[in-house]
Image (spheres, rainbow, N blue to C red):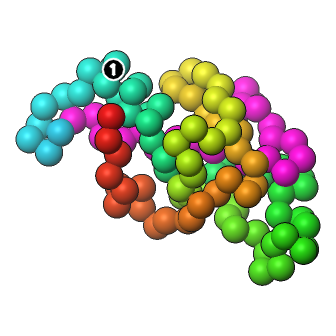
Amino acid sequence: EEANKLPVPTGWRLLVLPFKGKKKTKGGILYSDEQIERQQLATVTGCVLAVGPQAYKDKERYPEGPWCKKGDWVIFARYAGSRFKIEGGEVRLLNDDEIIATIKDPEDIVHEF
């Protein structure tokens, strides 16, 4: 039911849920909600929730096929895409060419805030 409330990407756009990160430090100190929100705004990693119908369809631009697919963890530029607040955080709509890389685990990327 919550998924029905998410924006549906059109054209060549991707819907990405930014990685929220940890709720506490390695030493066990809890981050405040404000710190967690700042971390999410500064993040450069996210999970692809949906892919628009035209994304990666241009065979000249993407001769080897799509750079990512639904469910992949990706890296993008810090200020890339359009941000939308949803219950529980934010999502981003990115153009298909704004994906810099795919990664296996977002925990591997250091998130500074």
Q: Is residue 16 left or right of residue 21?
A: right
Is 23 within the magenta? Answer: yes
Q: Quadrant of the N terminus?
A: top right
Closer to the camera in the image, 10 or 77:
77
Is 62 within the magenta? Answer: no
Q: Quadrant of residue 71?
A: bottom right
Q: Is residue 44 visible?
A: yes
Q: Quadrant of residue 81?
A: top right
Q: Is residue 44 above or below residue 113?
A: below
Q: Is residue 111 left or right of residue 41?
A: left
User: For the residue labelled by badge 1, is the local secondary structure a helix, a strand or a loop?
Assistant: helix
Residue 13 appears at what percent x and percent y?
A: 79, 47
Residue 87 appears at what percent x and percent y?
A: 57, 21
Residue drawn at point x = 56 percent, y = 64 percent: 101
Q: Residues within 10 Å of mark 1 (few under 14, many from 20)?
A: few
Q: Is residue 57 left or right of residue 98?
A: right
Range covered by the magenta-colored residues: 1-24
Amino acid type indicated by mark 1? Asp
To which residue does mark 1 refer?
33
Q: Is residue 75 above or below residue 6?
A: below
Residue drawn at point x = 24 percent, y = 27 percent: 31
Closer to the camera in the image, 71 or 57:
57
Residue 22 appears at what percent x and percent y?
A: 30, 40
Q: Quadrant of residue 38?
A: top left
Residue drawn at point x = 90 percent, y = 74 percent: 60
Q: Is residue 46 visible?
A: no
Q: Is residue 38 left or right of residue 102?
A: left
Residue drawn at point x = 57 percent, y = 38 percent: 79
